[in-house]
């Protein structure tokens, strides 16, 4: 094929092996052609095919002669930004940002070629638009003996890899800056040996040792625990089995301080270390010890008073028994005795607590006031037999599912001559309701000191126990809110100061870039630094969003429109195997909000959901108008009563465990790999929602996805009030029987009390297995089953299927923290008659029950 140039043949020779694989038929056809014209035509077709493959190759391919460019493919044109006409015939110097780069490549490439026949070097190329790209250049001469005959080369763009390496280095520098500048005491510890690897200045100030001394010590030298105990605690922290500890640490001056330690494993280079943040809690410990001492003295005095009161009551009872034994001998005192009996009966009848007394050792009842029978729910008190007392009253110990140990009951101990008191007995009455009792028991002795009776005094403390649980819950909510507020103030202050520093540095860089004396290389470096400043500014913006110190432009916003706009963006960005669903209320009320921040909130939640579903799943957006009543606001004090817009974002991803869920909104907390998350996504969501007067709740379990509920106050309460149509008249009282299945005891007690106030007869079960046993016994009496979806044991879904198998027409109302369109959808499709989301309001529960019952 004489019409082909030698240069073109050399470049196309790079693909000969490839052509031998994909074009064997073409080669055979050419051999079999008859006539020279046909051979030439076939050769030309082969040449065109070679040209096409060369131009579309996934790497840069070209040729130079005496370092002048003679051939390039399309990849090189895209990489450099030049056209083929601008490159062919030009010196390769035009592709290098400096003479040093150009000379270095020439020396190194030809050195390697002379040594091993080919050369490969990492260098930089200068695009036509001025951008510098990092490349790997590989060269092979056509003739080793005559380098002037031409050199073929390939080129690959490695700029992205270089940028990733730079970002990693800067990330490590930022960590070091924060570590050294933090006011909190920080340490890096080797978990294998306990050696103190590094400390920050705050640690040096607290412990009093110089850095060289402190970093030569082991944590066992500081902690007052034994070396083995310290090693065990380090292993817990390293395995993330526990992150919070309280220890006593030695200091250089010999003093010992109480400290709280937050510790977790971190990657430092190729080694895993323990990163510990330490707080001095010595003053708090001293205050706690003082308070505990005072509390003990108070309880001792209270117990003494009660014992005295019971002793006085026992003395009165003994006096009555003696009077009964000598009644015939003291007939003249009969009137006085009757008056005393009348006083005692009046006292017992009008007591607000229960009292009963039994003979010892037989246990025959002697005295029982009406309140005792009312609290216990029986008309005739049984004999205090050790064999049947727990069974008669169905008494159990708080926190235990089995019968209350008979030997620990105050009445039994009183019959044995012991005084006793308990406040952990729960008695189930015949009507199925439960009462929590506080019981005091004392023995009654005759003149010879022998016990002849046992007396118990007990009172209903159910309301007090529920109040204690509710108070603890509110205290935890207050603590969480205060913690988030404190972290927000800290983040806002740091972000504000850091923003000022960024502004100063960026301004000076811009002024420096305006200098005419700078060369291209220096200007490019200034641009790289300016870009890093911009990324830092975005991180500061996220911190300001969390701390609620960023300025916002608020206006009337319809969340449905914001969701539709975000969904169009997400359709182009999230993986295709994630299905997105919108369930939006047509009459949704408007909110007074910053539309940009609302979109940021939606994007953060959607991106987190997408990360939780690497294998695909469902992403669900829902909106509705909700009216929050006083009962709901009482348990969620962050919200006010009235109409709100409820935005629900659900996914079917991997979900979160309780420990992760507790820290989900903390800034800089992330479960993603290093470099893939800042830990500010959900923290920003929390800050934005709080800044808009709203509240965010999260419900999640491992393997069952996550559901975020955001409540925002409606802008026009009156308009929503007019649009809100009643779903049905729920003023009438119910009369049916409901089986309430819920594993959480306090929620079960609340639901039972509420539904009984609605007029219903309520049976309760703490698990799916218990519910099936109860339904098998009383199924014909049960009109509705209110079933919690997520319970230990067989769980709600299997319980529903078992109920439907027993009775296909059973009416089941499902309750769950997940969305009705999310995880709960499968259960609804299995045959449940309705769904109510947690946390529910009492008015919504009442309405849902009537809807399902019909």
Image (tube, helix red, strand yellow):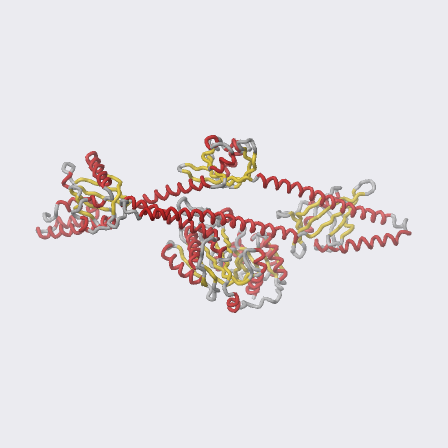
- Residue drawn at x 56%, y 60% is 841
Horizontal and vertical percent position of residue 342: 82, 55
Q: Would you identify the image quadrant in which residue 652 lies? A: bottom left
Above or below for 681 versus 725: above
Choose between 573 and 374: the one closer to the eye: 573
Picture mark count: 0
Q: Is residue 811 left or right of residue 143?
A: right
Choose between 463 and 263: the one closer to the eye: 263
Horizontal and vertical percent position of residue 536: 39, 48
Choose between 637 and 449: the one closer to the eye: 637
- Residue drawn at x 19%, y 43% is 152
Above or below for 822 versus 217: below
Q: Is residue 773 visible?
A: no
Q: Is residue 15 left or right of residue 160?
A: left
Horizontal and vertical percent position of residue 761: 63, 60
Q: Is residue 303 left or right of residue 88?
A: right
* Quadrant (top left, top right, bottom left, bottom right) of the C terminus: bottom right
Q: Would you identify the image quadrant in which residue 774 lies? A: bottom right
Q: Is residue 23 visible?
A: yes
Horizontal and vertical percent position of residue 694: 51, 57
Residue extending farthest to the right is: 332
Q: Is residue 251 left or right of residue 757?
A: left
């Amino acid at each position: 094929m004489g019409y082909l140039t030698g240069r073109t043949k050399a470049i196309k020779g790079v693909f000969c092996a490839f052509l031998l694989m994909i074009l064997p038929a073409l080669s055979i056809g050419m051999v079999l052609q008859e006539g020279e014209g046909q051979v030439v035509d076939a050769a030309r077709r082969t040449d065109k095919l070679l040209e096409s493959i060369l131009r579309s190759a996934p790497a840069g391919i070209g040729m130079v002669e005496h370092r002048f460019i003679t051939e390039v493919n399309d990849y090189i044109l895209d990489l450099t930004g030049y056209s083929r006409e601008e490159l062919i015939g030009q010196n390769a110097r035009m592709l290098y940002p400096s003479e040093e780069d150009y000379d270095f490549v020439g020396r190194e490439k030809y050195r390697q070629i002379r040594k091993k026949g080919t050369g490969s070097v990492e260098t930089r190329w200068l695009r036509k638009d001025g951008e510098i790209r990092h490349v790997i250049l590989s060269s092979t001469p056509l003739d080793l003996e005559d380098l002037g005959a031409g050199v073929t080369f390939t080129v690959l763009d490695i700029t992205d890899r270089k940028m990733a390496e730079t970002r990693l280095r800067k990330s490590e520098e930022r960590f070091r800056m924060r570590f050294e500048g933090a006011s909190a005491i920080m340490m890096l510890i080797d978990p294998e040996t306990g050696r103190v690897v590094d400390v920050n200045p705050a640690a040096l100030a607290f412990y009093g040792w110089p850095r060289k001394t402190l970093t030569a010590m082991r944590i066992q030298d500081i902690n007052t625990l034994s070396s083995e105990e310290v090693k065990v605690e380090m292993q817990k922290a390293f395995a993330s089995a526990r992150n919070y500890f309280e220890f006593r640490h030695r200091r250089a001056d010999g003093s010992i301080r109480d400290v709280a330690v937050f510790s977790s494993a971190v990657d430092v280079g190729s080694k895993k270390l323990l990163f510990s943040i330490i707080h001095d809690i010595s003053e708090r410990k001293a205050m706690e010890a003082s308070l505990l001492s005072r509390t003990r003295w108070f309880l001792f005095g209270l117990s003494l008073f009660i014992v005295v009161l019971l002793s006085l009551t026992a003395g009165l009872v003994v006096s009555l028994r003696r009077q009964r034994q000598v009644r015939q001998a003291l007939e003249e005192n009969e009137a006085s005795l009757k008056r005393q009996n009348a006083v005692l009966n009046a006292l017992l009848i009008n007591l607000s607590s229960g009292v009963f007394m039994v003979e010892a050792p037989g246990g025959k009842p002697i005295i029982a006031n009406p309140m005792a029978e009312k609290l216990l729910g029986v008309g005739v008190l049984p004999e205090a037999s050790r064999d049947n007392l727990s069974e008669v009253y169905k008494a159990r110990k708080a926190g235990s599912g089995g019968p209350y140990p008979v030997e620990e009951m105050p009445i039994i101990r009183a019959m044995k001559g012991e005084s006793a008191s308990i406040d952990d007995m729960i008695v189930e009455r015949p009507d199925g309701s439960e009462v929590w009792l506080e019981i005091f028991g004392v023995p009654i002795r005759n003149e010879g000191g022998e016990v002849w009776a046992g007396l118990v005094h007990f009172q209903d403390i159910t309301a007090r126990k529920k109040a204690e649980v509710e108070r603890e819950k509110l205290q935890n909510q207050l603590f969480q809110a205060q913690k988030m507020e404190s972290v927000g103030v800290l983040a806002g202050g740091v972000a504000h100061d850091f923003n000022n520093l960024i502004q100063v540095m960026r301004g000076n860089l811009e002024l420096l870039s305006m200098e005419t004396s700078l060369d291209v290389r220096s200007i490019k470096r200034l641009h790289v630094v300016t870009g890093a400043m911009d990324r830092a500014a975005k991180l500061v913006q996220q911190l300001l969003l969390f701390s609620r110190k960023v300025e916002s432009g608020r206006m009337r916003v319809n969340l449905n429109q914001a969701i539709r706009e975000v969904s169009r963006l997400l359709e182009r960005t999230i993986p295709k195997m994630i299905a997105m669903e919108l369930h939006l209320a047509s009459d949704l009320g408007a909110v007074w909000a910053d539309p940009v921040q609302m979109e940021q909130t939606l994007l953060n939640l959607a991106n987190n959901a997408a990360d939780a579903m690497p294998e695909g799943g469902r992403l669900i957006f829902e909106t509705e108008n909700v009216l929050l009543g006083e009962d709901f606001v009482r348990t969620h004090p962050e919200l006010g009563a009235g109409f709100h817009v409820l935005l629900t974002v659900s996914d079917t991803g991997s979900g979160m465990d309780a420990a992760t869920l507790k820290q989900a909104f903390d800034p800089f907390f992330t479960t993603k790999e290093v470099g893939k998350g800042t830990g500010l996504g959900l923290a920003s969501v929390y800050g934005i929602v709080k800044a808009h007067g709203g509240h965010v709740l999260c419900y999640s379990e491992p393997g069952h996805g996550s559901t975020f509920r955001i409540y925002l106050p409606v802008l026009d309460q009156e308009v929503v009030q007019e649009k809100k149509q009643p779903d049905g008249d729920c003023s009438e009282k119910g009369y049916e029987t409901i089986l309430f299945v819920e594993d959480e005891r306090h929620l079960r007690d609340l639901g039972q009390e509420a539904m009984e106030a609605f007029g219903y007869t309520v049976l309760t079960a703490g698990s799916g297995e218990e519910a099936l046993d109860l339904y098998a016994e009383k199924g014909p009496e049960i009109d509705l089953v209110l079933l919690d979806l997520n319970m230990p044991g067989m769980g709600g879904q299997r319980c529903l299927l078992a109920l439907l198998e027993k009775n296909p027409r059973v009416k089941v109302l499902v309750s769950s923290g997940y969305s009705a369109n999310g995880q709960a959808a499968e259960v609804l499709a299995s045959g449940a008659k309705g769904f109510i989301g947690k946390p529910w309001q009492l008015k919504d529960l009442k309405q849902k029950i009537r809807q399902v019952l019909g």
